[in-house]
Amino acid sequence: MNNFKSKYLLNNYSNDYKELVIYIRNIDIMVKHFLLAILILLHILYGYTIDIRSVAYSYFEDDIYSSFVNKFNKYSIENNLNITLTLNLFTPSNFSANTVDYGDLLETILKRKNRKYDIYFFEYMYNNRYGPYFIDLKEYLPKEHIDLYSTGFAPEIGTFENKLVSLPVPETWDELIDTSKYIMEKEKEIDPELISFNGLFDDSEMGTCSLFEYIYSCRDSIDSPFPSFNNDTVANAFKYLKDMKEKIASNEQFKESTLYTLEKLNDGKALFVKYWNITPNPVYKKSIIPGIKRGISGSTIGGESIGIGSDIGDKKINASIKILEYITSKEFRKNFTLETREYSTIPSLYDDDDICEVVDCEFMKSIQFVPRKFPPEYSYDEYSRKFRSYIYKFLYGDTPIREALNEFDYLNKFYSITISDTVGKYYAFILLFIVAIMIGSLVLPLKSDFRKYYRILYPDFWIFSIFGTFLMLGSCHVGFGSVTVIKCHLRVLFFSFGVSFNIVPYICMLSKSIHLKNKLWKKIKRNSYFILACVLLIDNLLYWLILMNPFTISKKMTKSGRNYERCRAVVGINVIAFYIIMIFESLIVITTLYLAYIKRNDEHLKNDLRFLIISLYTTLLSIILIVLMDIVNINDYVTKFILFEVFYTVLSTSNHFIFFVIRPIWLYNKKVDEDHEYMKAFRSSAIVVLNSSNQKTNSRASNSHC
């Protein structure tokens, strides 16, 4: 009994203990879940971080971008922005290519829209190239922030101590030449390694910079804009540059690269060194580049642009805008300039006393910046390379300066054939001669001996066909002169309506000579105008589709430099409508050929059909060649003009000359009675139908009789 009691107490105690343990465990789990929920909530409220990825290229490992990133991330933590900026920096040590290849890499990334990066650092010359892939910062940045950069040279690029203390620093190119000659004459035996002026006109982007700033330093006055390349100012400037090179330097010295310049800066073995704004050897003193006159100078703008991808989502765009606002703020730029001595594109900073203590503000204000502008149709790298190559043909070769400048000027022009050109004069004469013959041929139907050869068509259909011929000739006339949107539309209008008016009358003629028992066919035969009206209605509908999305002018850039403009359909509906018109007009010709094929064995029409088939094949071949010409890439604008005009001329005149002129003359010489043969053709067909109809009637009568 006692034993049983003790067992009962023990078991009861064990059960209570187990329940207590389970209860404690449940509380522990609940507490853990509660704490986890609080942590998650805190993370959501305060710990969510947006990662913004940026990419840049730098020639040097010690770059400014890393400083931007570090400073912003520190600023983000201090202000609880929950934004982390990371940088993928390409340098010569981890990227074997150059800035051109880096530019191609960026364009590939942007075109694929793979959102690999959010912020892009790139040279300002590529604004046109990358601009379409970036957001418009004006829609995101405050106006007062943008106004910081509204003056100075920033708008041009964003929218897309000398030991010889006894001599003054040259302010003009004449003074630089005189000073160099004087010192080199005295020093050449003491220091044979000494050079006068590095030039830095090498075959790299540095050479392009040197050429642009030199031209700008030779303008007529300080207020003069960058001169055009085909005027006397630029020609005389380059003649002066070549004379300077021969007096104080050499081809080899002017062609030396950046490395050579840096060596001279380090060893001090050059009187004058032209280079970017860097901390120089203490033996040198910075000065602005000389000019052709006192007070005139020129300095190429070099710098980076910043772009934010347009397809990264609103959350990342807003985070990127905060980064951009920070690193372009006046306070940040001021502190950055104080730390690094780097110049800023905010002009008002050079009125700040703190800045002027570490930076020569007066020197900065005296710099006359010039951007490297180029036609947006070109790739900048290709344009820059061609620019250098043409100028260097004169500077280092024997090409006359006018010839070199004219070759380069071709890059900036778009050419077309006009009546004043040799080709234009010849073609205009040929065209006028053809028109004169065509007008003269209109008297043939009025002559009694030839009148019967024109009865194959009704007089009104002859008028329609001839009207179509002259409409198509209008396509030839619009080929002269510069390309305009109106001319693009006129050429399509003249072509489509011209072919329809010219060919459809023959469909009407052939349909009358083909006698079928189909009721619809009989109605069509009785209403010839219905065919022409339907065709013209379709032409109108297709042409209105093109007018809804007008043509644009495409600029064709060629290797020869003879660029030209052409009509281009860029919107899908416009392209489709254009090719449907070409197909539709081809089908009109093919339909006429098919009807002529059906009647090919007609004894009374074979003479006419022989000429008609030849003219139709010529017309169809011309249309095919015109379409191919539109597709094929032709670089020479003269060749393109000649081929297009020849094909349009053949298209316009072949049917008229073959069927309207040559056919009657041939039949007249053969003494063929066209009027008699024509009546036979239509009567014989009618008799066949009538006999067939009578046979059916007789057959029915016989059957009923039986």
Image (cartoon, rainbow, N blue to C red):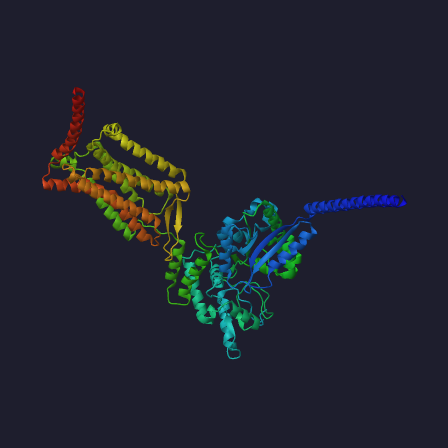
Q: Do we see residue 162 in this rendering?
A: yes
Residue 455, x across and y down, in percent:
16, 33
Q: Residue furthest right?
A: 2
Q: Report the number of numbered marks.
A: 0
Q: Quadrant of the C terminus?
A: top left
Residue 485, x across and y down, in percent:
38, 43
Q: Foreground: 120 or 509?
A: 509
Q: Is residue 425 above or below residue 170?
A: above
* Residue 456 as seen in the image, left or right of residue 534: left
Q: Residue furthest left?
A: 671
* Residue 10 as seen in the image, left or right of residue 264: right
Q: Foreground: 260 or 418?
A: 260
Q: Foreground: 52 or 260?
A: 52
Q: Residue furthest bottom?
A: 189
Q: Residue furthest top?
A: 705
Residue 282, x across and y down, in percent:
61, 69
* Residue 304 as seen in the image, left or right of residue 384: right
Q: Is residue 175 above or below residue 435?
A: below
Q: Is residue 476 above or below residue 366?
A: above
Residue 62, x across and y down, in percent:
60, 63
Q: Do we see residue 419 in this rendering?
A: no
* Residue 357 as seen in the image, left or right of residue 569: right
Q: Quadrant of the N terminus?
A: top right
